[in-house]
């Protein structure tokens, strides 16, 4: 190396830095690499989805000194609900406040980077995976974790989507207490209606099932529901009358109406992100990503957590499975490295 063009101070600075880098257990180059997003496109783990599950996994991985990228498109499924319940320490808090607080805590770790974007494709490479985003960024990683949630598919009933998460609710543990003893509808048919009738009766006895067309409940289910004085209305629904998402009436196609304060409904859903399927991850019959007890999918080096892989939709479950997935992903790396 020719030092003639360097000042004495510059030589001391450069060699000093090199020595420090050699003394560190983890190469300094690797840390400086991912401090600058534009320079670094390679990560130990990429987490797609940066809501409760993804942030929880990010915290476990960031604290395990893994260089992690979280890519998030900012569309959590509970975006419309005014208050989130049943998550200890945050009961009644606004959903985005919980997520922002989590994000602030996770991003305190300089091992974790956050990128606002939509991951649009993923492919297996020789050393891991390549992820491409909508804005044209490309990132590579050894391991992938999907915390992408699910997308609810609303029925074609005017007013339903406006009331979703406000007065049309999916889960009594999340919102049942707030509408206890109120005049309540179950907008469902068949087994889902039967399951809801049993469950919701715990929170209110003023219950009516709206099957929105011919009931598909079995005779045995119908007899049980009748025995509990729960009417079944088969009339087709035209729309929901509401004020700022607070339902007031169900309006039927025959122009009659039914007053009520809350409706339980479990709309169909699909995976929010199609990349797990592109990579060959198996889905369950319900359309969830199949994972084992360590949150590993059917594809090697690919993990999933939160709503996309669990029928138990709650913030607590998303945080729990995210934390588990982060630890298990790190554990896989530790086993490979040791
Ligand atoms: C209306 C409603 C009200 C609810 N109320 C409560 C409640 O009171 N209490 C409770 O405990 N639970 C509640 N839940 C359930 C709870 O919100 C979910 O269980 C929780 O949000 C799941 O967290 P998650 O991180 O798995 O998914 P989500 O919170 O849905 O987040 C998924 C994230 O992944 C991102 N993403 C998806 N695809 C991509 C992609 N391709 N690229 C980049 N980013 C992507 C999305 O933008 C989103 O930010 C409610 C759910 C709903 C629908």
Image (cartoon, rainbow, N blue to C red):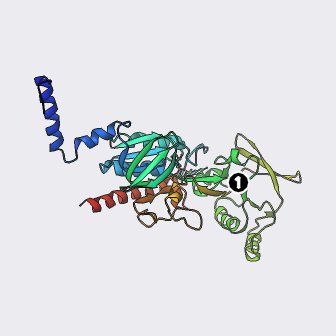
Q: Where is residue 187 in the image (x, y as percent from the top left)?
A: 73, 58
Q: Which of 232 and 4 is in front in this view?
A: 4
Q: In which quarter of the image is the N terminus?
A: top left
Q: Which residue in the structure is indicated by mark 1?
A: 263
Q: What residue is rendered at 40% in x and 45% in y?
A: 69
Q: Nearer the viewer, residue 270 or 106?
A: 270
Q: Which of 22 and 54 is in front in this view?
A: 22
Q: Which residue lies furthest to the bottom in this view?
A: 220
Q: Quadrant of the C terminus?
A: bottom left
Identify whether 256 is placed above or below 37. below
Q: Position of residue 326 (x, y in %)?
A: 38, 55
Identify whether 259 is placed above or below 100. below
User: Is 24 left or right of 87, judged from the image as shown?
Assistant: left
User: Is 114 left or right of 266, judged from the image as shown?
Assistant: left
Q: Is mark 1 on a helix, strand or loop?
A: strand
Q: What residue is rendered at 37% in x and 57% in y?
A: 126
Q: Which residue lies furthest to the right in this view?
A: 254
Using the rendered image of the protein, determine whether residue 308 is visible from the camera's viewpoint.
Answer: yes
Q: Where is residue 304 in the image (x, y as percent from the top left)?
A: 46, 58
Quarter of the view holding residue 83: top right
Identify whether 105 is placed above or below 225. above
User: Is 31 left or right of 302, judged from the image as shown?
Assistant: left
Q: How many labels does the image show?
A: 1
Q: Position of residue 177 (x, y in %)?
A: 61, 53
Quarter of the view holding residue 266: bottom right
The 10 Å Cα crowd at callout 1, few under 14, some 14 to 19, many 20 or more, is: many
Identify whether 122 is placed above or below 7. below
User: Is 253 left or right of 171, judged from the image as shown?
Assistant: right
Q: Which of 102 and 222 is in front in this view?
A: 102
Quarter of the view holding residue 297: bottom left
């Amino acid at each position: 190396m020719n030092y003639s063009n360097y000042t004495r101070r510059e030589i001391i600075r450069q060699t000093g830095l090199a020595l420090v880098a050699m003394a560190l257990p983890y190469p300094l180059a690797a840390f400086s690499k991912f401090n600058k997003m534009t320079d670094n496109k390679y990560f130990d783990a990429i987490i797609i989805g940066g809501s409760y599950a993804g942030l929880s996994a990010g915290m476990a991985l960031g604290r395990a000194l893994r260089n992690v990228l979280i890519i998030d498109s900012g569309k959590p499924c509970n975006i419309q609900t005014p208050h989130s319940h049943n998550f200890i320490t945050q009961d009644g808090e606004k959903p985005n406040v919980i997520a922002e607080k989590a994000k602030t805590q996770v991003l305190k770790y300089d091992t974790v980077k956050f990128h606002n974007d939509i991951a649009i494709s993923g492919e297996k490479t020789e050393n891991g995976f390549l992820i491409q985003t909508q804005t044209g960024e490309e990132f590579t990683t050894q391991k992938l974790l999907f915390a992408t949630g699910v997308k609810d598919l609303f029925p074609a009933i005017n007013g339903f989507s406006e009331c979703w998460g406000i007065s049309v609710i999916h889960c009594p543990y999340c919102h049942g207490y707030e509408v206890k003893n109120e005049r309540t509808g179950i907008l469902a048919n068949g087994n889902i209606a039967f399951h809801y009738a049993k469950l919701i009766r715990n929170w209110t006895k003023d219950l009516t099932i709206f099957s929105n067309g011919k009931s598909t409940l079995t005779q045995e289910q119908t007899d049980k529901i009748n025995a509990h004085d729960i009417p079944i209305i088969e009339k087709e629904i035209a729309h929901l009358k509401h004020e700022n998402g607070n339902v007031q009436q169900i309006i039927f196609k025959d122009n009659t109406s039914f007053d009520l304060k809350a409706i339980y409904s479990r709309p169909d859903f699909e995976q929010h992100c199609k990349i797990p399927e592109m990579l060959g991850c198996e889905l369950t019959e319900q359309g969830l990503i199949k994972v084992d007890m360590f949150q590993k999918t059917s594809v090697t080096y690919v993990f999933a957590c939160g709503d996309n892989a669990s029928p138990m939709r709650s913030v607590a479950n998303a945080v729990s499975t995210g934390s588990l997935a982060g630890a298990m992903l790190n554990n896989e790396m530790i086993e490979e490295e040791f």
